[in-house]
Amino acid sequence: LKQGMLELNPSLDIHVIDYFVTIAGPPFLHTFPKTYSKLAGNPALWRLVWYGGLFPPTRFLFLGFLELLVKKKFEVVLDSLNPDLIVSVHPLCQNVPVRVLKKRKPHIPFVTVVTDLGSAAPTWFHPGVDKCIVPTEHVYNIARKCGLPDEKLSLIGLPVRQPFWGSPEFGSKRRARMSLELPSADIPIVLLIGGGDGVGNLGRVAESVASELSKKFGKNEVQMVVICGRNKELRSRLDSLEWPVSIRVEGFVKNMKDWMRACDIVVTKAGPGTIAEAFISELPIMLSGFLPGQEAGNVSVVVDSKSGSFSKNPKIIAETVCLWCTDKNLRRELSQNSKRMGTPDATRKIS
């Protein structure tokens, strides 16, 4: 969003502030990032926290505790920066700011940009905001149920990284394959992603997909790419294996647009950003997992749009991917459905 706004007006003075680390401080200062990563790696614990947040008494107590920590510090930040606009992109950053801004003159507009595709916590939707921008009809309907009127809602799409601001150009797949030193011939290439931290059962899924593909393709008739993110242990283990099909194992990459453009299918967990970027890249999407509650609705967005499928079972994932690789017409249909769901201009429109 910052890049989008600066593209429109380079003279803007934009401050990106971590609400929990910078403003709330202790006990969030050193624990929040690590706690989030641990929760993301433990679905059972994440489920407990998510559904606890949906329970009104629990939510009331937590938001009250957060207000005690944040209110005065937030007021200090307001006095220091004196902003003309505040934009929130986190579900817990509405309640205190809106309550504080209500008492201040002159009025400072407050906008929420929801970054969940299918499921969204009630804390995203505060009736006191000036505008709430949502990515899908799923979330629009949730916002309405939470009390936001239509005039405060805008259905635009999900903001994505700058390289994805635009539909794929003709011939870009071949160019991407050449730049990444992937086979330029018309063979199916399967991309497997475990997120920035390489979480989930990425290793088992990769082995299962390779085994299934080897039943239908020769070693050089199909290509796999596994991106392990920051998970060095996983990358090392996968690099040490003997594979029945051609494979590239990568760590953390900064050119995800090129990898998505070069490939024909993506296997990933149900993170909203990855799904939005896969839609823009016109990829069939095989979802292999999701965070309970928060990402459950993302699965529905993919499956209901007929842009892909979902299973946690590595064997079923492998069989589905293999079917898509062998059936070009089905793969083309899934790709067209993904294209229909993509919103490459969303970031610019929101900005």
Image: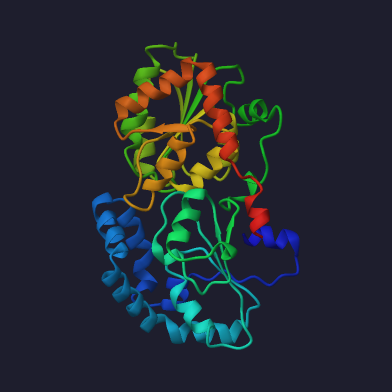
Is 38 on the left or on the right of 102, as rendered? left
User: Which quadrant, please, contains the N terminus?
Assistant: bottom right
Q: In front: 286, or 177?
A: 286
Q: Nearer the viewer, residue 119 or 41?
A: 119
Is any part of residue 270 visible from this angle?
no
Residue 9 image-quadrant placement? bottom right
Q: Residue at x 27, y 70 (%)?
A: 58
Q: How many marks?
A: 0
Looking at the image, residue 79 lies above or below residue 130: below
- Left/right of residue 13 with respect to residue 61 in the rendered view: right
Name which quarter of the figure residue 113 lies in.
bottom right
Residue 141's place in the image compared with 97, above or below, is above
User: With respect to residue 30, does 312 lie above or below?
Assistant: above
x and y, in percent, of residue 151 in the image: 59, 64
Q: Position of residue 230 (x, y in %)?
A: 42, 47
Q: Residue at x 59, y 39 (%)?
A: 280
Q: In the image, residue 263 lies at what x, y percent?
A: 55, 29
Tell me where residue 247 appears, x and y as whole percent: 45, 25
Q: Can you see residue 86?
A: yes
Name which residue lies at 44% across and 47% down. Answer: 271
